[in-house]
């Protein structure tokens, strides 16, 4: 059993928290109330960033001490929304939210994953008609292995998990969010994931 703090209690955070509890982990979900995120992060072994990406960097830098020596799993995408509320552009072109977090929090082990799919797929990958991919980006192999194990707990087969390399590779998976609004406009909010055909 791992002690996990989920920052963000929206659809993504709530979905992940429910699935991780079901898998046997001890999970605390932080809401927007003062001190909630700090309290949750302080006692956790792993912290999941499921806050809206546009404000994630500021929120998490404020938790520098609580995140020291922790694994931070970043599942957010930092985007500028268009008039219809769907992602229209990247906030960190030529970089990524994950890279910005790792640079700002050097004593935290940032791992990017689960950001290339609609949120229901994060915890139910086998419901898709084709095998999806979950990508990992991060600097520390042991942190990525820990996150890989968490993904298996969420229903991801080992062969569906692809380690892309260092944290800089997150700029590729974060840029993939620009596919999402076009796919949604074309086929609606049917669950899907961006994956590599092999």
Image: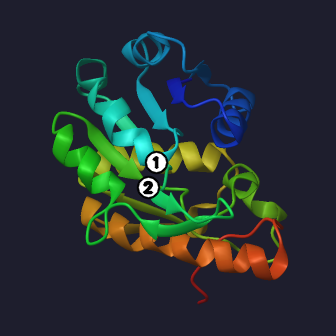
Q: Is residue 55 left or right of residue 128?
A: left
Residue 94, image x, y percentages: 26, 72
Q: Is residue 124 above or below residue 44?
A: below
Q: Which residue is mark 2?
A: 78
**Residue displayed at 46% across by 19% down:** 37
Closest to the observer: 177 or 198?
A: 177
- Front residue (pair 88, 151): 88
Residue 166 seen in this snapshot = no
Give the quadrant of residue 146: top left
How is the protein colored in the picture?
rainbow
Q: Position of residue 33 (x, y in %)?
A: 54, 13
Left-right relation of 18 to 89 = right
Residue at the image point whose x is 42% and y is 60% from the top: 136
Identified at 19% across, 41% down, the residue is: 104
- 178 relative to 25, above or below: below
What is the crowding at mark 1: few (fewer than 14 residues within 10 Å), some, or many (at least 20)? many
* Gap in angstroms between the C-alphas marked 1 and 2: 4 Å
């Amino acid at each position: 059993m791992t002690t996990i703090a989920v920052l963000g209690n929206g659809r993504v955070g709530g979905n992940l928290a429910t699935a991780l509890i079901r898998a046997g982990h001890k999970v605390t979900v932080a809401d927007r109330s003062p001190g909630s995120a700090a309290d949750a992060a302080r006692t956790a072994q792993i912290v999941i960033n499921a806050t809206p990406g546009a404000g994630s960097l500021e929120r998490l830098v404020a938790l520098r001490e609580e995140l020291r020596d922790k694994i931070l799993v970043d599942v957010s995408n930092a985007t500028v929304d268009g008039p219809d509320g769907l992602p229209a552009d990247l906030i960190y072109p030529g970089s990524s939210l994950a890279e910005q977090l790792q640079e700002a929090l050097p004593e935290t082990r940032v791992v990017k994953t689960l950001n290339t799919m609609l949120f229901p797929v994060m915890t139910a990958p086998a419901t898709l008609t084709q095998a999806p991919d979950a990508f990992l980006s991060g600097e520390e192999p042991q942190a990525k292995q820990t996150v890989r194990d968490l993904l298996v707990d969420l229903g991801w087969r080992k062969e569906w998990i692809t380690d892309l390399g260092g944290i800089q590779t997150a700029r590729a998976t974060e840029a993939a969010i620009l596919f999402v609004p076009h796919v949604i406009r074309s086929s609606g909010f049917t669950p899907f994931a961006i994956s590599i055909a092999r």
